[in-house]
Image: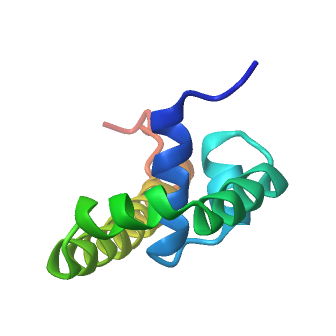
Amino acid sequence: MPYPAAFRQQMIELVQLGKSANELAQEFGCYAKTIKKWVTQASTTPAHTALSTTSLSTAEREELSRLRRQVRQLQMERDILAKATAWFAAKGEKMFTPSSSF
């Protein structure tokens, strides 16, 4: 089934912002080869070059890139905290078992 034009355009713009086709393929569940083909086709289409330069300003592209980095950082921190919570919860069950001497 073909991908919607809006999805293809989004993938092209994300590659232009610096994301790799492999990262996008893994994140969105499509093939990196397909994304690379879309980018190649878009770069040879004159209508696309005019559209892509007006879709986001340089400041917006920079902000989008910064926000994506921040999201990745926050996701990593969340994962670390979740693992630490699970580890401490498992340790706590062993260390603080109720005793019958109370």
Along the line of sight, which residue is nearer the eye, 42 or 4? 42
Q: Position of residue 63 (x, y in %)?
A: 20, 75
Relative height, residue 92 to residue 61 (above, below)? above
Along the line of sight, which residue is nearer the eye, 86 or 30? 30
Along the line of sight, which residue is nearer the eye, 78 or 14? 14
**Residue 66 located left or right of residue 13:** left
Q: Is residue 50 visible?
A: yes
What residue is shown at x 43% (from left), y 50% (from top)? 96
Residue found at the far front of this picture? 46
User: Residue 50, located in which quarter of the rendered image?
Assistant: bottom left
Q: Position of residue 21 (x, y in %)?
A: 69, 64
Q: Position of residue 58 (x, y in %)?
A: 22, 81
Residue found at the far top of this picture? 1
What residue is shown at x 71% (from left), y 24% (from top)? 2
Along the line of sight, which residue is nearer the eye, 15 or 75? 15
Q: Position of residue 86 (x, y in %)?
A: 51, 51
The quarter of the image holding the N terminus is: top right
The quarter of the image holding the C terminus is: top left
User: Residue 82, located in which quarter of the rendered image?
Assistant: bottom left
Q: Is residue 13 visible?
A: no
**Residue 41 located left or right of residue 96:** right
Relative height, residue 47 to residue 76 (above, below)? above
What's the image's color scheme?
rainbow
Q: How many callouts does the rendering have?
A: 0
What residue is shown at x 19% (from left), y 73% (from top)? 57
